[in-house]
Amino acid sequence: MIGLRAGWLGALLAFTLMSAIAGVALAGKTNRNNADALTELLSSITRSLQDLQKHEQRPEEMLLLMMMMQQMAGKDVDWGAEILAIRRKLEETKAIGKDVDWGPEILAVQRKLEETKETLLNPREGISGGQRERFFPDVRHRLAVFTFDDPHATGLGDPISFLLSKKLLFSSRVTSFAIVNYRQGADRDSSSDLAYFDRVDAVTKDQNFRLAIWGRLSRTERGVRIDSFLQIPSDAEKSPYERTIQLPAAMGGGTLTARLKPDRLLMQSLYVDYDKTSLLKTAAEQIAILRASPAVAAPVAGRLVGGGNDTTGSHSILGLERDWAQLRLADGTSGWTSVDQFCTDICRSLLDVANFANDLVALTSGLAARPLSKSLTRDAETMLQQLAALVSLPDNPNRATEIAERWTGVGSSRGIASGGAGFANLLAVARVKLELKRASAREPNFDRIRLDRRAIGRIADRLAEASVADPSDVDIVENLAVLFGYLGDNTRRKLALEIAANLKAKAR
Amino acid sequence: MVASSLIWRLASAFAIACCWLSGVMPVAADSILAGTVTDAITLQPVAGAEVQIEYSGQVVGAGTSDIDGFYRVPFTVPPGAPTVSTMIASARSGSHGIARSNFQVKAGTPVTTAHNIALFPIGVMDCRAQTRHSVIVGHFLPPDGRNLAELSTRIARSLEYALNTQLQTVRLTLELLPSFEPCDAAKPATTRLAADFAKALRADAFVGGDISAADESSGFTVSIYVSDAHGLFSIPETASNRRVDLSNPSVASIAGVTHAAVLASIAAGLAGKNDCVSAIAVLSVAERLVDVTPSYITRLRKICESRVPNAGLRRATQ
């Protein structure tokens, strides 16, 4: 099943702005003065903002609103020209390389503030290695949820992935968001020479998903244990989980890379008593029913995946109201459904997994993460913190350093903790970035900057320790090769390059 | 020794008589194969083991081991016979399984006259895994005569399910993933002997235990120990699992410390094969499963860290 969310906030914003534009245009025709029109416009925008503040707002949308207000202040407005001007400004902002992660959805906003679409599909496809980004190639945030591995035949594999995919979609904090729910995709096949992780990896990489969620179910003495995993493409380059910094030409001009590690993560282990497992199935069944209005008791209007006439499995989100989402199926049927209304009790704990994944995506779009649920693992918290540090790296290396310093030591008494190597590498890159930033204040020509070799030496030595603690981390050894190169330590540089080459060859 | 020699002679005579009665006509023996029959686990001699030598499907010699496990079998094969003959050994008591091995013959004479034989206890030989890394899950001593033969299988499946998934999070390749072999026939007399089972079966670890009949309504207490084949544990690592529902055939809960001990054994196996990079990856999984890192993990990590090529990236003075 595929879900595409690309901006109900955008639609609301468009509506707000168009209303305002229409209002001011009308005011112009009736010769009301610009100040009145502006006051009306501002109050309209304020109301809209208050509405929007109930949800976390994308930075680009806020910026757009502000620019609109700036453009309108004290002018006899030509709205078509103004919008064009805003677009130009947005283009200019992009062109100067300001580190604002715009992505395709802002292009959609630029194209006449077009309402973006939200769609769900249920492709029932396997690992095909087919067309890359087969579904919603223009969407910025594309996620996949795979049916949970169910060797003990609990019957919960599909219901759980269905629940999670809907929660992800309905509560996404960003626009331009797609979910592919592989219900029958990477199913359990003991004859395969690929582990489930690797099969999920294959689809994730083939279809260029930003992240994938799957899990394993096992029976316990008193019920079922649900292990939910998250994985990001192992070798995703230029991904939202990677940041690079360039060294000045005087330092060799090499590139240092920091990447989110680990890329496979147990997010949650949830124990569900036998008598509560039916809650999960029932919740999935109820969520699959579309109702005529956003109420539990409302008449049935249609059915999502698993029943009815929905042959393609696709549906679009028409709108949201409280906990309810209004969907339109491919056959034109529309109706309301809700995850939160039906997923209660222990089912609600399971949804922490979807909230966590949504927070990861939100972080890559510049939004802040919310407090982590206690039901999630320590590793999940580690990943969230590391991503927060990673996205801070380009513009705020101080913050990246602070976070990384705080977390690098976690678990050090017992060797390398989960994410420890990732934090150590991030810390090294952030420190170099910080030094470069300080040096830039003294030397305006970036390429002439040469950092103190002793400082770089200390950073490299610490990084070498991290490399020993996690010898399979390629980024660390490649970064070490760059640093040793600047230090003029050709022996260690050569060794680092050799180790990196071996690790890459082994990974292939 | 006189007595044992007498027994040996009697046994030899008995074997020859058997051959005669079974229609195998011994011919004048011009070669001798000799050696010792031992228990593959305890390495103790097995007395009274029958040893036969086959050539081209025919028994061409037979003998019996003495009290020291020593056997000596005269046999004859034609000078132009193929270079390989087969020796079959079995314990007369039925306590051990049959061992079959080939030996080289040149011009009708064994290339090596001493040919030692290791016999596995009945049923144990089949537990030997074909994978590079394996864990044997042996017998669990049941309370008050209950039959819990399936418990080894349940625990093996539980270990495989939990640990192999964890190991994939650190991208351990499939060929390095361990197999977990249920082996109810493996019943070490003491927990210390369990390490010998692991070694004999070429496994990294042996898992066994016993079950206490606590309050049956709230489940049983299953004590699980882990012994390793690489000398990692001075004494077996033991953990107690409470409130285990033995009536449910599909599950068996296992404590994190047991998981960690099994993983450390596998890491030791990897380190023994000079793959310290993978060993460290396995140890990192083990470290996450316990609140306090056991000293054996810290020790093994240090050894491995000194062996990986990345150690050369440290400053020379460090």
Image (tube, rainbow, N blue to C red):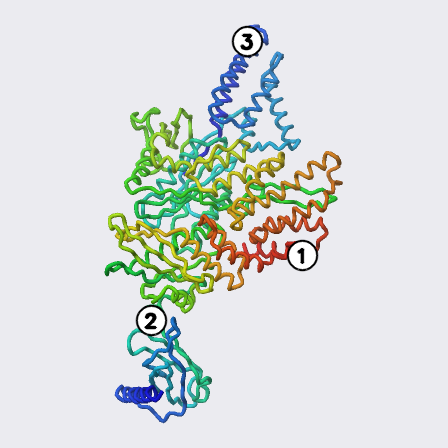
Where is residue B236 drawn, in percent x and y? 41, 60
Is residue B24 visible from the viewing direction of this image? Answer: no
What is the three-letter code of the residue carrying label 2? Pro
Q: Which mark is residue B121?
A: 2
Q: Secondary structure at mark 2?
A: loop
Residue B19 placement: quadrant: bottom left
Say how many tags the image has.
3
Which residue carries the number 1 mark? B316
Residue at x-position 45% and y-position 41%: A144
Q: Are marks 3 and 1 on the same chain?
A: no
The amino acid type found where label 1 is placed reads Ala
State the separation of the CA atoms marked 3 and 1. 78 Å
Residue A292 place in picture, x, y as percent: 33, 25
Q: Nearer the viewer, residue A314 or A436?
A: A436
Give above or below for B177 relative to A332.
Answer: below
Give the residue pinned by disc 3: A27
- Count neighbours of disc 3 (C-alpha within 10 A) and say few if under 14, some if 14 to 19, many if 20 or more: some
State the residue in front, A207 or A278: A278
